[in-house]
Image (tube, rainbow, N blue to C red):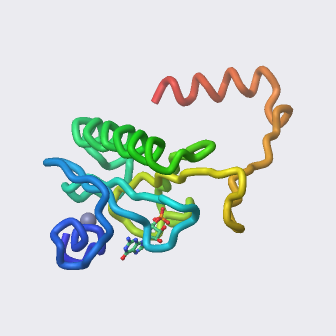
Amino acid sequence: MTDCIFCKIISGAIPSYKVYEDAYTYAFLDISQVAKGHTLVVPKKHSQDLLETEPAVLAQVITSVQKVAQMIDATLQPDGINIVQNNRAFADQSVFHLHFHIMPRYQDDIDGFGYKWQTHSDAFDADAMTALAEQIKNA
Ligand code: 5GP
Ligand code: ZN
């Protein structure tokens, strides 16, 4: 896609700090590092998000996510790793070319990494949970 920033990075039209590349995928440091080693993994074939991506392409991308996470784990030895993937602007997607964030976590994380959400274990009763599961299952 001509006006997609990640397509331009993949083609080399825009420079990047590449950490991995194969026939189907490309991985590079996020320009705004949330934590040391924060890396994006993308398919070379443009698709907007996870919901729109062909399963075969997705399989290639997630395989590369695992490979690059293992590379980061071996070299930077983080205390943990979050894999984050945003779909649509409402869910904080800002670049509309599918990407997975690999976010290494360290005990002394630089300030700003908030990855806690409020859980509501009593928000739906058993009947509501059953109906919800049925609704999704029947899609
Ligand atoms: P999103 O918010 O869509 O899940 O994540 C998009 C990410 O792309 C952001 O973390 C942002 O820092 C990163 N990003 C945006 N433009 C560029 C760029 O030109 N180069 C690199 N390396 N990262 C970018
Ligand atoms: Zn693209």
Q: Quadrant of residue 54?
A: top left
In this rendering, the answer to whether 99 lies above or below 55 is below
Split into quadrants, the picture shows ligand 1 in the one at bottom left
Q: Quadrant of residue 133?
A: top right
In this rendering, the answer to whether 59 lies above or below 24 is above
Coordinates of residue 39 in the picture (x, y in percent): 43, 58
Q: How many callouts does the rendering have?
A: 0
Q: Which image quarter is the N terminus in?
A: bottom left
Task: Using residue 91 as the reference point, say whether residue 111 is left or right of it.
Answer: right
Q: Residue at x 68, y 53 (%)?
A: 115
Q: Nearer the viewer, residue 80 or 136?
A: 80
In this rendering, the answer to whether 32 lies above or below 82 is below
Q: Residue at x 40, y 64 (%)?
A: 29
Coordinates of residue 132 in the picture (x, y in percent): 64, 29
Q: Nearer the viewer, residue 90 or 137?
A: 90
Coordinates of residue 111 in the picture (x, y in percent): 71, 67
Q: Nearer the viewer, residue 68 or 59?
A: 68
Q: Residue at x 74, y 27 (%)?
A: 128
Q: Quadrant of residue 65?
A: top left
Q: Residue at x 23, y 59 (%)?
A: 46
Task: Using residue 127 as the reference point, say whether residue 92 is left or right of it.
Answer: left
Residue farthest along the right direction in this orientation: 122
Coordinates of residue 125 in the picture (x, y in percent): 82, 26
Q: Which image quarter is the C terminus in?
A: top left
